[in-house]
Amino acid sequence: MRITLIILFSILISSGINAQEILTLEEAISVALHNNSTFLKSSAQIDGYESGVQEAYGNFLPTLGVGASWDWSRSDVEGVGTIIINGVPIPRIGTTTTSRSYRGFVYSDWTLFDGLANISALSKSQNDLESAEFTLERVKQDIVFQTMSLYYSIMYNQRLLEVKQDNLKWNEKNLETIKERNRLGAATLADVYQQEVAKGNAELELIRTENDLQTAKKDLLFYLGIDVLQDFEFSDSLSSAEREILESTLQQSYRDISELVDNALNERLDYKSAVLNYESSRDGVNIAEGGHWPSLTASGSYSLYTDNLSNIDQSNTLGLGLNLNFPLFLGWSVNNRVQLAEVQAKVTEIELNDLERDIKRQIKTNFLDLQAAQKALVVSEKNIAAARENLKIEEEKYALGSGKLLDVLIVNSRYTDALTSLLNSQFAYIVLSQQLRYYLGVLDYKIYEQQ
């Protein structure tokens, strides 16, 4: 299903057909989990960390190599002067000599002890890999929450647009009614002008909301990696999960902040990654301190030597050896590496502590905001009923001639504000609920990967 969706969106983006296809929230998240540049970069780095673990394991194994050499030389000596043999002078004769040598060899080195640096290097590479994997998982949660927030902004503006459209229709209808009343002498010309101003303001609010909606759509498409010039429709109906959020209460879902923080420290993938980064930095200190220890290396070689390939085994040599190296003074280079590693460890420890404090701050702030949003939701729902009833009363009073148009317009404005406030409260509560799950580290992204 997931692959089908990606293929579908690729076709839509490349060909531009079916521009009015409805892009659901689930489909948008699925696309973001494949196209988001941050995710692609984090995913590509995993291979590098896996290679680092493989290299660290290689430090425990002996090295092995083979080689061969061939040498050829020629020496020319010219004859100069004569030599006397039995009283007979004989001219010297020049000579030319050539030589060839062939050699093949196998060699191996094995580090038996290096101050435990190889063990620390393996631990560091494993921690780095696991930390990168946690970071990648957290990036996925980031993408899910960001996509949700951008999509909810579209849903909010679409619903708000309906409110503004209804408000404009009411003002247009009311303007027609007042003009007719003015024609019959039951309303003043001032009422007509006043209602025309109200209608113009309603049109302006509608235009602003339409612009906000288009901006929200473009923001989402840009985040998804889709051409912002493409035209998609978006759902404005709440899912069963979102309706369940609106119907739930904080007491049903969560208990207290202390428990939330404890759960977050156990679940937050970025916190787990930070813990592993700190452990990795401590391994870096151990690696640097290994320079103070002696090193022990075993070596072995076997070579064949001859001046004729036909008897290659004419001469062979087998060599074994142990090399113990104890550094006495290296110009404080080891001390410098240890100091730098300890500084890096201190930095990662500070970052870990900062993240823990930030998690507590995020959760406490979000929890309080969620409590306020829940109260605002309840108040907004009550205000709707009161504002609707007041509007009905003022309309009837004005129709009977016992009320003022200004009062009707004020009450209608309050009714429109109440509807807007309800939408604000609903989507604020949904976003804050999802944000709390994100801060707790329990926002599930796997369900969208499987679609």
Image (cartoon, helix red, strand yellow):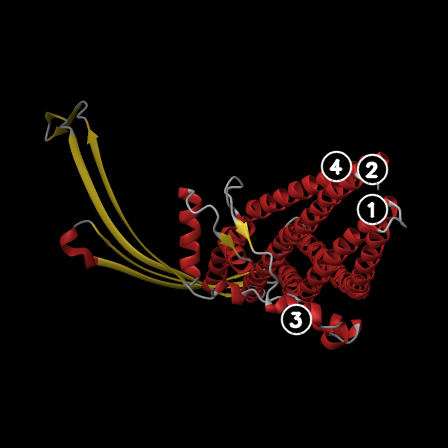
> Residue 32 has which mark?
none
Q: Position of residue 367 (x, y in %)?
A: 78, 66
Visible residue check, residue 443: yes
| Mark 4 secondary-structure assignment | helix
Q: Which residue is labeled 2 in the image?
A: 194
| Disc 2 residue type (three-letter) | Gln
| Disc 3 residue type (three-letter) | Glu
> Residue 409 has which mark?
1
| Mark 2 secondary-structure assignment | helix
Q: Which residue is labeled 4 in the image?
A: 200
CB within 8 Å, label 1 to label 3: no
Query: Could you tell which of marks 1 and 3 lies nearer the N-terminus?
Result: 3
Q: Residue furthest front?
A: 184
Q: Position of residue 361 (x, y in %)?
A: 79, 61
| Disc 1 residue type (three-letter) | Leu
CB within 8 Å, label 3 to label 4: no
Q: Which residue is labeled 3 in the image?
A: 244
In this rendering, the label closer to the viewer, 2 or 3: 2
**Local crowd size for mark 4, using a 10 Å CA cut-off: few (<14), some (14–19), many (≥20):** some
Q: Residue furthest right?
A: 402
Location of residue 370 (image quadrant): bottom right
Location of residue 115 (image quadrant): bottom right
Q: Position of residue 147 (x, y in %)?
A: 60, 55
Query: Could you tell which of marks 2 and 4 lies nearer the N-terminus?
Result: 2
